[in-house]
Amino acid sequence: MRGFIGSLAVLWAITSQTASAEDLFLPDAGLDADLSGMGIVPEVLTATRLKQPRSEVPGSMTVITAENIDQWGVRTVPELLRFVPGMFVKHADQDSVAYHASNPNLMRRMQVLIDGRSVYRAGIASVIWEDIPVALEDIQRIEVFRGPNASSYGANAFMAVINIVTYHPADTLGTRAFARSGHQGVRDFQISHSAEVGDWVYRATVSSKRDDGFDGRERKGGPERLPGDNLHDGSDDRFISINAATQLSDQSRLLIEAAYKNGDQRLRQNFGEDLIPPVDENESGFLMGQWQYDHSPGHTSQLRAYWQAEKRRTDYRKCAPAVALSPTLNALYQQDPYWALVIGRLQLPDDLVTPIALGIADPAEVEARLEEELDREYDISQSDLDQAQLIFAEAGFDVDNLTSVACGDYQLDFDEQRIDIEWQDTVHWNDWLRTVAGINYRRDEVRSETYFNGTVSNDLFRVFANAELRPVESVVLNIGGMYEDEDKNTAVFSPRVAANYLITSQQSLRLVYSTAVRSPDLLEQSPDYSLHVTDLTDNYLGLDEGTFFATQTGAYGDLDHERITSWELGYYGRLPTRKLEMDIKVYRDHLYQLISDPINLFTPDVSADTTMNIKGVDWQFTWQPVKGHALWYSGAYLNADVRLNDTANLSSKESNDLQAVETRLSSEFSHNLSWSASFGDWRLTQSYFWHRSYNNYSAGRNTPYRRYEMNLQKDWLVNGLTIETSGFLHRLIDDSPIAYRTNYIEDRYLGYVQVGVKF
């Protein structure tokens, strides 16, 4: 809390003065007028929380409009983000999105907002896209700020910010419904209705979405092909959402949003271990209110508060060596986890079993033999060998007992909720100065017997301010920062300084310096992670229930923030006579104190010591050569250098895998091309994705990934109703999976059809 009171005093001094400024619109107010005319520079809000023309934004922006969403015809938000330069998407049990480079298993280095509400999870840092209760048809635009933006949105706005803005209910009056069906078990249904009731206007949406996921290249011991959900990685999700708004007075307005979602995510079954196919059962919901008040034409205040909650349950019945349930082995794990893993995972060389059982083994000889066999460093003591001898004695010195299998039930549980309150004040002081400042309080609480053995929580306080200065007509300076203080991590300050030189009102050069942090999540800072197994089959230990030997009880210690320092040189141009818009950036990012180690029971040590340097170029062009035709071309070149620090406890393979995981989802060169054309009442959109040296390009692999997509649309007017029809087809050109070899679809051609009605 040090410095928080002082920051509040400075903030109050700034925002309590009177001034004249522009009106601040609601987050979902329309920008269609700005985006539709080539003669007007489009404006965005996400970069600094100030409404700014694209030419004056302190960073790189991509805006995906409702028209783009409709034309591309995809089913999910991650599929839309493939069109963003430098952004890569992995589809698996759960979708993952990374900007430039990041671990594909957890999406934890980008902030994702829905109408200003963060859906970034604090318990286990990630964004679960399937849990976001928003229909693509309700989205007005998606603003993607490509670069660190902690100065506006705090920790975890580390490499990018994705702000999904939905339509105001007044802009969607009427009813719309559709059904979609296609390959891989796609079965989607949705109905949305908007209407006015007194002084209120509302929209209610009900949605159901289902698919069978990948069919996979291998089944880990199972049959090659099965009907339906071949890999058991499909999903079935349903939600209902409410969005309501009212004008309280000439000066104030209120927006309320709420949603409830539940679903089943089928998880891949490991044959020989999982006796039943596991299913992740989840439900979530939120309630948000946002009030705005105009003190004057140039001074607006906003109060936003929301509560959100999530529950997840996954039941397993697995089989494993019975020795893994030994209390003596658990005690050994607390003493020497790496030695315990050798015993518990049955990795001990056969020729060492008898000497250890007889108590005649020499620690130095065992250590040398293990290092030769398992390719990693060990520190074996006589106490370690004595503990192993006790474990062998429990089994009656019978190898068959040690290797015998026991089966039982366990559950992964996770209940998380958040309360967030934020006050923001925006002032237009004069022609050369505008500011936005605010304070925020957030409480995250997680209950889990699996991960925390109870309840853990974290309180976060934040103060932020951004100023836009115009010292001369052709120069715009953006200076901002955020101070954050929380229970589980040290206080941090994240600044940004940017200068935009306006060549014309629609063309600019920019130079940006920014820093950001990612706060370690609650599992990284406060783990009490264990698996309690019940209903055990017969085993030599005589247990009806027990605890898996590997546990994590706060052993990680105090991990520091992940940090990034970024430099960017960019150009934005909008040429109305040529109907061309472009954005190009050259960047150099230095990421350090990264936490690359997986957080699981087999990882005794987790360190914040990975360094990654990324440099490259992003580009994006949109062009309307003739009426009814539009071209979108985006791409990126990136070069990432990943360096690990302490690898003493890792084998060569583990070290290589850990180094590769940060770039597994990255492509050295990526190109995304989309062309949309109208032919009378028909509209055809074709898209082509080409990623060269995809999937661990740094390891010297040349694994291109190419994909072609087509969406054909036509509306029919029948007795006052608009019948909407479309057909979507994609073709996988290359035989390359995405990130992992099971992320594979056997059929090269896939598609679905959609029929809807609007009135």
Image (tube, rainbow, N blue to C red):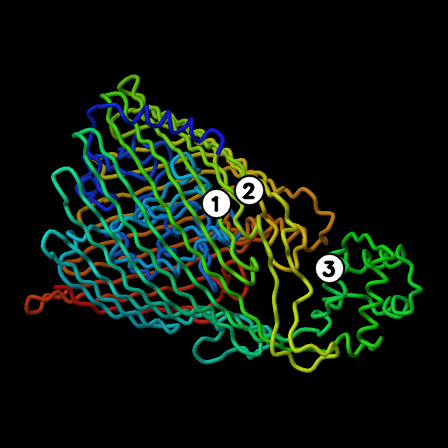
Q: Are marks 1 and 2 in contact (CB under 8 Å)?
A: yes
Amino acid type assigned to the residue bearing label 1 in the image: His
Residue 617 locus on image (x, y percent) = 45, 38
Which residue appears farthest toward the top when viewing the image? 472
**Where residue 601 sits in the image (x, y, percent)?**
63, 60
User: In which quarter of the view is residue 301 placed?
Assistant: top left
Give the residue at mark 2. Answer: 640
- For the residue marked with disc 3, what is the amino acid? Tyr
Among the 4 quarters of the image, the one containing residue 551? bottom right
Q: Is residue 428 left or right of residue 236?
A: left
State yes or no: discs 1 and 3 in contact (Cβ < 8 Å). Answer: no
What is the secondary structure assignment of the residue under circle 3? helix
Indicate the quadrant where residue 750 lies: bottom left
Residue at position x 48%, y 75% from top? 230
Q: Residue at the spot x=16%, y=52% of the render?
A: 171
Q: Nearer the viewer, residue 291 or 30?
A: 291
Q: Position of residue 610 (x, y in %)?
A: 61, 42
**Mark 3, residue position:** 333
**Of callouts 2 and 3, the N-terminal one:** 3
In this view, 176 is above or below 659: below
> Nearer the viewer's eye, disc 1 or disc 3?
3
Image-based side of 677 in relation to 413, left or right? left
- Left or right: residue 442 compared with residue 553: left
